[in-house]
Each structure stands twice: as structure tokens, then as C-alpha cells.
């Protein structure tokens, strides 16, 4: 599903959560929505789901989503830990509700996922642990097979094996049923290999929208003898450093010129890709950040 946002502003009283934002998602990709706490991720996803009257426009496949039942049926927004579900409802009822609301719902897949995440169908939502409630949210998000599926910090409270099962399942299902999936997370490195495109927001504004590989190429990890690394990186923007004995790895921001590549080779330095998380911190750091 194609998503077009034009001049979107979301306000809560005096607070401007989204400030005149415009972008287009061409669709059928896994997008990472990244931003610090309070950056506006949840507000943006709510507007894309048509939950609030937009100031500006939000169009899904060319039609406005707000007060458009047909468009909203093609969207699934899962807030963290299935918080919208009634605590007294059984899991089976939550799935029935998911099925009733979405044309693309795959019930067999929903049942398969509840088994994978070990969620009892007769259990009440209020009796699920935080991680299990999150897993239920993921079940709804994936089984909806919605052309626009948004998972807002859906991993909250999940233990590590469960998170990895979630990532594997998500990728597998996306490959079998390509659609537009947007995930917000603070666990950037864990998810980074899944993300094809990254949208970074900060203080309600779009910082950048870029393919993940292009974003990674904005920085380089330089590894080698500590004094050679220091000499090579002098005058560059160094985002972070790690040392082990006499070996050092420095993350530098900005593409390297040909003469720098030759100099690195001459010093015997290894050059590698930079972690998405380090770039994210740099791009959204109010103190040291440089845009
Ligand atoms: N219901 C609300 N009433 C008032 N202000 C709100 C409300 N919801 C969000 N805000 C404010 O809007 C801004 C954006 O919040 P939002 O929840 O969209 O951020 P977020 O990026 O999802 O944050 P987090 O990563 O912490 O979940 C924040 O300043 C927040 O305090």
C-alpha cells in the first residue's frame, strides 16, 4: 500500500506532536520508524491509521483514510502489548474481533501463531503476562495481513527468544505476503537487518527517510592499531570508539574520499559498515548531533 502524507500536523492542546510532516512510502517494504521518546511515532501511526482527524492529508493508495471505513479496514495498527483489548476478553474473542474487522484476516495463521507464542485461546487478556500480551498484538498484526500493518513497539516485555521468533516470523510472512509494514522500535540493532527503509522522526519533524543500506553507507567503522586509527580519524566526525588492547574501532560519519580510502589501506586499517543505531543516535542527539 502506498502512503502519502502531506503537511500533517497533530496537536494535543499546546503540544505539537507532529509538525507539518510530509513524506511518501512507495509501499510493500518493511519500514523502520525510529525516534527518541516523545518524538511523535505513536501520533504519526495513529494518524496513518485514520484514528484522528488530520490537519494536512493522509492518503492510502490515493484515498484519504480518515472517516473512510473501507480504507481503515485495510489498515492494522497494533499498539504495544495489545493495550486496546478489554482485559476481561478471552484471547479467542480478540481474534474473532480481529477477523470481523479485517477482510484480509487469515484465521489459520492466527491459530498457528498463538501456538508458536504459547498463548492459550481461553485465557483472558488480563491474565496474560506483558510479553504474552505483546505476542498477542503481534498475532493480530501478522494474521491481519493488512496492506498497511503498523507495529508500535510490539516487542515490549518479550524475552529475547520470543523477540527473535517474532522477527523471524515477521520476515518469513512478509516474504510470502509482501505488504507495507511499519515498525517502531528502540531496539534498532536487533531489527536493523529486517528494515528496507528507515524513517527517522525527531520532535515531530521528519529527520530523514532513506533506504537502510544507503543510511549505513553514511558512516564507516575504522579498525586497526589505535595510534593509526587516531591519526586517520583526526579532524573527522567520530561518533564513537571501542578499544581492545592496542586495537581500536572508531565510527566515523560521512563518506570517505578516494584519497582517504588509499591512506586507510596504506595504514593497514579495516573499513566496515557502521551500526544503524550509532547513526540514529548521531542524527537525533540534541547536544552532539549534526544533521
Ligand atoms: N494524549 C496525549 N495528550 C497530550 N500529549 C500527548 C498525548 N499523546 C502524546 N502526547 C505528546 O505528544 C508528543 C509525541 O508523543 P508520541 O507518543 O507520539 O511519541 P513517541 O515517539 O511514540 O514516544 P515513545 O517512544 O516514548 O513511545 C509527546 O510530547 C507526548 O508527550
Image (cartoon, rainbow, N blue to C red):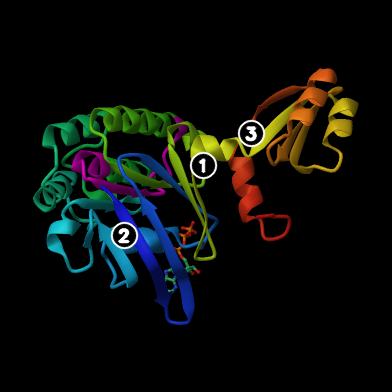
Q: Residue 66 lies in what quarter of the image?
A: bottom left
Q: Nearer the viewer, mark 3 or mark 1?
A: 3
What residue did someone put label 3 on? 274
Under circle 2, the secondary element is helix
Q: Residue furthest front?
A: 258
Residue 117 visible: no
Q: Say which residue appears at 51% left-offset and 42% top-offset.
A: 187
In the depicted structure, whether residue 177 falls above or below residue 206: above
Q: Residue at x 23, y 44 (%)?
A: 140
Q: Earlier in the sequence, mark 2 or mark 3?
A: 2
Q: Which mark is residue 39?
A: none
Label 3 residue SS: loop
Label 1: which residue? 187
Mark 1 and mark 3 in contact (Cβ < 8 Å)? no
Q: Is residue 153 magenta?
A: yes
181 with respect to 230 (left or right): left
Q: Residues within 10 Å of mark 1 (few under 14, many from 20)?
A: few
Asked if residue 61 lies left or right of residue 232, the reply is left
Question: Mark 3 or mark 1, which has the lower sequence index?
Answer: 1
Is the C-beta of the residue carrying label 1 under 8 Å from the nearest atom of ligand 1? no
Looking at the rendering, the stretch of residues picked out in magenta corresponds to 139-160
CA gap between label 2 and label 3 equals: 31 Å
Residue 162 magenta-highlighted: no
- Give the distance between the C-alpha atoms of the residues marked 3 and 1, in whole angstroms: 16 Å
x and y percent of residue 105 in the render? 14, 42
Residue at disc 2, CB closer than 8 Å to ligand 1: no
Task: State the residue at coordinates (43%, 37%).
Answer: 196
Q: In this view of the protein, can residue 45 be seen by the observer?
A: yes
Amino acid at each position: 500500500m502506498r502512503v502519502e502524507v502531506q503537511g500533517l500536523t497533530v496537536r494535543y492542546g499546546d503540544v505539537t506532536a507532529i509538525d507539518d510532516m510530509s513524506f511518501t512510502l512507495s509501499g510493500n517494504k518493511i519500514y523502520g520508524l525510529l525516534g527518541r521518546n516523545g518524538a511523535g511515532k505513536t501520533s504519526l501511526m495513529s494518524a496513518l491509521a485514520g484514528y484522528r482527524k488530520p490537519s494536512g492529508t493522509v492518503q492510502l493508495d490515493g484515498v484519504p483514510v480518515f472517516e473512510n471505513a473501507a480504507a481503515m479496514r485495510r489498515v492494522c495498527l497494533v499498539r504495544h502489548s495489545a493495550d486496546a483489548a478489554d482485559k476481561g476478553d478471552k484471547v479467542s474473542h480478540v481474534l474473532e474481533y480481529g477477523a470481523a474487522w479485517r477482510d484480509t484476516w487469515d484465521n489459520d495463521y492466527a491459530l498457528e501463531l498463538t501456538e508458536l507464542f504459547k498463548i492459550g485461546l481461553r485465557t483472558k487478556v488480563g491474565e496474560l503476562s506483558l510479553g504474552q500480551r505483546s505476542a498477542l498484538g503481534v498475532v493480530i498484526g501478522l494474521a491481519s495481513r493488512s496492506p498497511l500493518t503498523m507495529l508500535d513497539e510490539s516487542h515490549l516485555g518479550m524475552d529475547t527468544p520470543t523477540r527473535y521468533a517474532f522477527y523471524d516470523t515477521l520476515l518469513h510472512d512478509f516474504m510470502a505476503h509482501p505488504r507495507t509494514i511499519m515498525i517502531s522500535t528502540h531496539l534498532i540493532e536487533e531489527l536493523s537487518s529486517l528494515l528496507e527503509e528507515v524513517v527517522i522522526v525527531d520532535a515531530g519533524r521528519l529527520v530523514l527517510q532513506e533506504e537502510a543500506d544507503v543510511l549505513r553507507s553514511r558512516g564507516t567503522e575504522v579498525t586497526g592499531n589505535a595510534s593509526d586509527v587516531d591519526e586517520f580519524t583526526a579532524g573527522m566526525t567520530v561518533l564513537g570508539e571501542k578499544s581492545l588492547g592496542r586495537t581500536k574501532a572508531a565510527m566515523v560519519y560521512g563518506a570517505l574520499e578516494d584519497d582517504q580510502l588509499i591512506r586507510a589501506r596504506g595504514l593497514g586499517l579495516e573499513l566496515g559498515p557502521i551500526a544503524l543505531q550509532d547513526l540514529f543516535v548521531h542524527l537525533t542527539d540534541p547536544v552532539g548531533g549534526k544533521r
